[in-house]
Amino acid sequence: MADLAQLVAQLGSQARAAARVLATTPAARIDAALLAMAEELLAAEKVILAANELDVAAAKANGQTPALVDRLTLDAKRLAACAEGLRQVATLPHPVGQILREWTQPNGIKIAKVRVPLGVIGFIYESRPNVTVDAAGLCLKSGNAVILRGGSEALRSNTAIANTLSRGLAQAGLPAAAVQLIPVADRDTVRLLGESVGTVDLLIPRGGRGLIEAVVRTARVPVIKHYDGICALYVDKAADFAMAEQIALNAKVQRPGVCNAIETMLVHRDVADKFLAQAGKALAAAKVQLRAEPLALAALQKAGVAAVPAKDEDFRTEFLDLILAVKVVDDCAAAIEHIETHGSRHTETIVTADAATAEHFLNNIDSAVVLWNASTRFNDGFQFGFGAEIGISTDKLHARGPMGLEELTSYKYVVRGSGQVRS
């Protein structure tokens, strides 16, 4: 325990020193480091993928779920996407130093509200080694140092990636401690990171509910949470069925193991029989297990679509798998009520040709992201033009939704006077 505490304290001290350097590093050097990190990732492809193969093999041998194995797996295409994400981040405007507002008081003092880095970010995550790259790039671009604590299932992959990113930092003449990975999987490191008052300015856990709740229970530093993605699709009576079917398939099937995949599909009573006959067959063909409440179950069975009765908890579950809870609702108001009662305030979408109904849905759903005629899979920092994201916050303070560069900064007031004193 003493050794672990010493390790985390040392990483924190090194990160704090690196953060002071990054806060005043010219933008061009930050961008050069990001590009160098991208090149190093591609150059180290064989080493990284070999490490990842060992992690994936161990996960399968340990009986991990297909969803976790999918999140864990890297290939050449996914690694190239990581590198492209770094390049995209390098092209984005630098947030640090942006003047958010400035004004002059009657006494002549000039006040500016200026964007500044948060400082040191502790980032705790599971399964997905590509997140190591995203977090490092976004923190660097926003002038922050980051201490990464990945899951034990991805330790080999994350170590290989972190070593590669450090080489890119060195090429640009920036502190290697700007991006550090806790090199052990001991769970006590999570608690120790959360207790690093005076060193860590913000803690971001990204993973399952169990991880996040464990972090929140023990943390003494501010935490931004990324809770369950119990996302819903509502098919309105004025929906284009072909569009709704494609959105449902994309939102459920493309990558079912991610947080912005839908777990619930709500269908207006007036179109339930016709739409569920059509979309139900398409979803079943994609090997989606449909768990339906009585009205939806009857409509699916009438059309010859395999389905099973839904339990109440199915509408409060993040399956992260090819499973979809289906319910028939009376109208848009009933859909909103269901989502507000059973959802996780993550991502919801409506498919309809009725603009008034769509606006009612968009205005009355209290989720981080709401969409009209688009897949929930678009709740993603890269898709929003952020280059990447460090997570999707379901909190309301200090950030909400995909967390990009601006969400990794704070601000300070800079006041310039000419000898004024307060009377």
Image: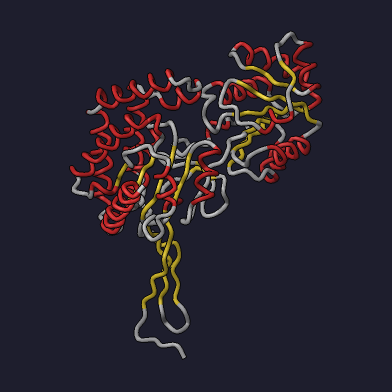
- How many marks can you see? 0
Q: Residue at x 42, y 31 (%)?
A: 128
Q: Nearer the viewer, residue 248 or 390?
A: 390
**Residue 217, above or below 85:** below
- Render colour scheme: secondary structure
Residue 144 appears anywhere in the view: yes
Q: Position of residue 155 (x, y in %)?
A: 35, 32
Residue 77 appears anywhere in the view: no
Residue 412 falls in which quadrant of the image? Answer: bottom left
**Residue 28, above or below 290:** below
Residue furthest top in the image: 304
Q: Is residue 300 left or right of residue 233?
A: right
Q: Is residue 418 left or right of residue 375?
A: left
**Residue 74, above or below 121:** above
Q: Is residue 392 left or right of residue 363?
A: left
Q: Residue at x 24, y 41 (%)?
A: 166
Q: Nearer the viewer, residue 159 or 235?
A: 159
Q: Position of residue 24 (x, y in %)?
A: 27, 59
Q: Residue at x 59, y 31 (%)?
A: 374
Q: Position of residue 51 (x, y in %)?
A: 30, 25
Residue furthest front in the image: 1
Q: Position of residue 242 (x, y in %)?
A: 65, 19
Q: Residue at x 80, y 22 (%)?
A: 294
Q: Nearer the viewer, residue 184 or 371?
A: 184
